[in-house]
């Protein structure tokens, strides 16, 4: 708003007296204001401002309204009240024009949103000084509100950035799956729910067999493509909204299955292994020349003193047993 030209301000003068409108116009012109508009009644002013005339001509944009207090039909006080109910006009200052014996009405005018007043008969020096002062005030208020809007927008952008960072912190960029941090958070949530309702929680840890050798033999771009394929295959196994698959580590994935017993989790693990093998990812050191996965399965019904990472530890032990038994094995953790 720097460099604002007050003389270009759009001013609306509302009065039922034609001689007064002519006088006001002459005074404002003498002060260099030539973007002037005139209305002989409140209703004429409403028409110009687009109040109660939806679908009509484009409403007049004004920077200041000078309005007589005493007018027939709708007086200046009621007109001011109605103008201030329009959001786009709320910041437009309304200056009431009154005779000395009407000063008592100004209290009502200020109560409905009037900004200032001038008393008839008018002095050109006074009216020009008041107009310039209130336009300067409007400019300063506008500048401060713009600054507040910019701060609010910056705050909104910062909060959005924080949310994005929090999401990135819990998701794997390569596969689009949640990561280990996301699994731990969701496991804790499901663990507490299962504790309240005495329900089982199942977890499968999945490790790609000899993935280091695969990367060396095939190249890292092929390794990345392999991880993406496995992520899609594992996601396709999930059957319920509460089921979750994440990339747990470099070549490890995890599947969280709330309210799932031994039969359900083993069926899920076998289906996951089948879908991975169906991908037909070639690797000459794997069984039948294909890449395989090993799985560790754990099930627990939470007890009051049992932390959620207990289930992770059980699944990790089962995965170690599966890896030791050879590629493509599924082992279930022993209860403890």
Image (cartoon, helix red, strand yellow):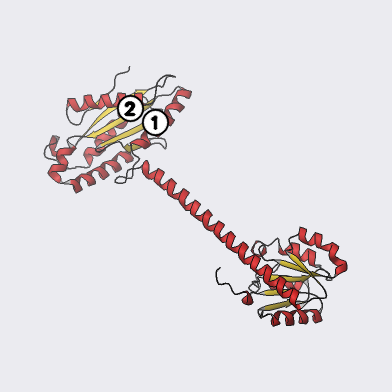
Q: Position of residue 238 (x, y in %)?
A: 35, 37
Residue 91 shows up from this direction: yes
Q: Does 5 appear above or below 211? A: below
Q: Quadrant of residue 17?
A: bottom right
Which residue corresponds to the image point at 39% horizontal and 31% vertical from the top-left? 187
Q: Residue furthest right?
A: 101
Q: Is residue 57 left or right of residue 159?
A: right
Which of the labelled discs sits on residue 312, or is there none?
A: 2
Q: Secondary structure at mark 2?
A: helix
Q: In the rendered structure, are the residues bearing label 2 and label 1 in contact, judged by CB atoms less than 8 Å apart?
A: yes
Q: Is residue 145 left or right of residue 50?
A: left
Q: Position of residue 34 (x, y in %)?
A: 66, 81
Q: Is residue 58 left or right of residue 2?
A: right
Label tally? 2
Which of the labelled discs sits on residue 187, or is there none?
A: 1
Q: Nearer the viewer, residue 166 or 51?
A: 166
Residue 238 shows up from this direction: no
Point out the image quarter for the C terminus. Answer: top left
Q: CA distance from mark 2 to mark 1?
A: 9 Å
Which of the labelled discs sits on residue 221, or is there none?
A: none
Point out the image quarter for the N terminus. Answer: bottom right
Q: Quadrant of residue 245?
A: top left
Q: Does 7 appear above or below 106? A: below
Q: Position of residue 235 (x, y in %)?
A: 33, 40
Which residue corresponds to the image point at 79% horizontal and 64% vertical from the top-left? 77
Q: Residues within 10 Å of mark 1 (few under 14, many from 20)?
A: many
Which residue corresponds to the image point at 81% horizontal and 63% vertical from the top-left? 106
Q: Residues within 10 Å of mark 2 (few under 14, many from 20)?
A: many
Which residue corresponds to the image point at 80% horizontal and 79% vertical from the top-left? 20
In primary-sequence order, the first of circles 2 and 1 is 1
């Amino acid at each position: 708003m720097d460099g604002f030209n007050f003389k270009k301000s759009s001013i609306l003068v509302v009065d039922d007296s034609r001689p007064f409108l002519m006088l006001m116009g002459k005074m404002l012109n003498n002060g260099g204001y030539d973007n002037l508009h005139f209305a002989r009644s409140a209703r004429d002013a409403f028409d110009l401002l687009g109040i109660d005339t939806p679908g009509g001509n484009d409403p007049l944009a004004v920077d200041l309204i000078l309005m007589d207090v005493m007018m027939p039909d709708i007086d200046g006080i009621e007109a001011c009240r109605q103008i201030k109910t329009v959001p786009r006009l709320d910041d437009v200052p309304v200056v009431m024009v009154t005779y000395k014996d009407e000063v008592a009405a100004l209290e009502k005018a200020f109560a409905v949103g009037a900004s200032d007043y001038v008393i008839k008969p008018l002095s050109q020096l006074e009216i020009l000084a008041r107009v310039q002062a209130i336009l300067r005030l409007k400019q300063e208020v506008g500048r401060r509100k713009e600054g507040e809007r910019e701060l609010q927008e910056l705050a909104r952008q910062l909060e959005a950035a924080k949310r994005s960072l929090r999401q990135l912190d819990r998701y794997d960029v390569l596969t689009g799956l949640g990561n280990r941090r996301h699994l731990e958070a969701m496991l804790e949530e499901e663990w507490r729910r299962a504790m309240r309702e005495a329900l089982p929680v199942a977890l499968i840890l999945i490790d790609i067999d000899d993935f280091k050798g695969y990367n060396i033999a095939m190249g890292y771009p092929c390794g990345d493509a392999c991880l993406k394929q496995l992520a899609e295959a594992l996601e396709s196994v999930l059957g319920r909204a509460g089921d979750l698959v994440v990339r747990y580590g470099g070549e490890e994935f995890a599947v969280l299955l709330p309210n799932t017993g031994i039969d359900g989790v083993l069926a899920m693990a076998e289906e996951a292994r089948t879908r991975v093998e169906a991908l037909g990812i070639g690797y000459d050191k794997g069984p039948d020349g294909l890449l395989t996965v090993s799985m560790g399965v754990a099930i627990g019904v939470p007890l009051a003193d049992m932390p959620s990472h207990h289930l992770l530890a059980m699944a990790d032990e089962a995965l170690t047993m599966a890896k030791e038994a050879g590629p493509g094995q599924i082992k279930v953790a022993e209860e403890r």
